[in-house]
Image: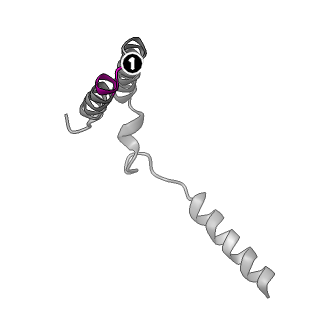
Amino acid sequence: MLTGIHLLLNWALLVIIKRPVDNETAPHAGVHARRYDRKKRVVRGLWFASGLMMLAFPITQFVVTLGLFTTFLSFTILDETL
């Protein structure tokens, strides 16, 4: 009995997970656009430069401030409402 329930639950999960999704109406449809990829590349470069500055000036106040500012800029750049 337990094996039957286990198989039924696994089958149900596979059906739910493997269900095809319409790409135009999917909630993540805009995420894979070229524009978003360019924004991600800019943010990656920003974090790389910020990390190098953190290594160059290992002062706690500077590192925390720069990290918070870089986080703010990252969210601002990746915001999709613009």
Residue farthest top in this picture: 56
Q: Which residue is mark 1?
A: 58
Q: Quadrant of the N terminus?
A: bottom right
For the stretch drawn in magenta, the main secondary structure is helix
Q: Position of residue 6 (x, y in %)?
A: 73, 77
Range covered by the magenta-colored residues: 59-63
Q: Residue at x 62, y 67 (%)?
A: 13
Q: Nearer the viewer, residue 45 or 20?
A: 45
Q: Nearer the viewer, residue 29 or 36?
A: 36
Q: Position of residue 18 (x, y in %)?
A: 60, 57
Residue farthest left in this picture: 82
Q: Nearer the viewer, residue 11 or 74?
A: 74
Is residue 1 a member of the stretch shown in magenta? no
Q: Position of residue 72 (x, y in %)?
A: 25, 33
Q: Would you call the spot at circle 1 few (<14 residues within 10 Å), some (14-19), or many (20 or more)?
A: few
Which type of secondary structure does the marked residue at label 1 adopt? Answer: loop
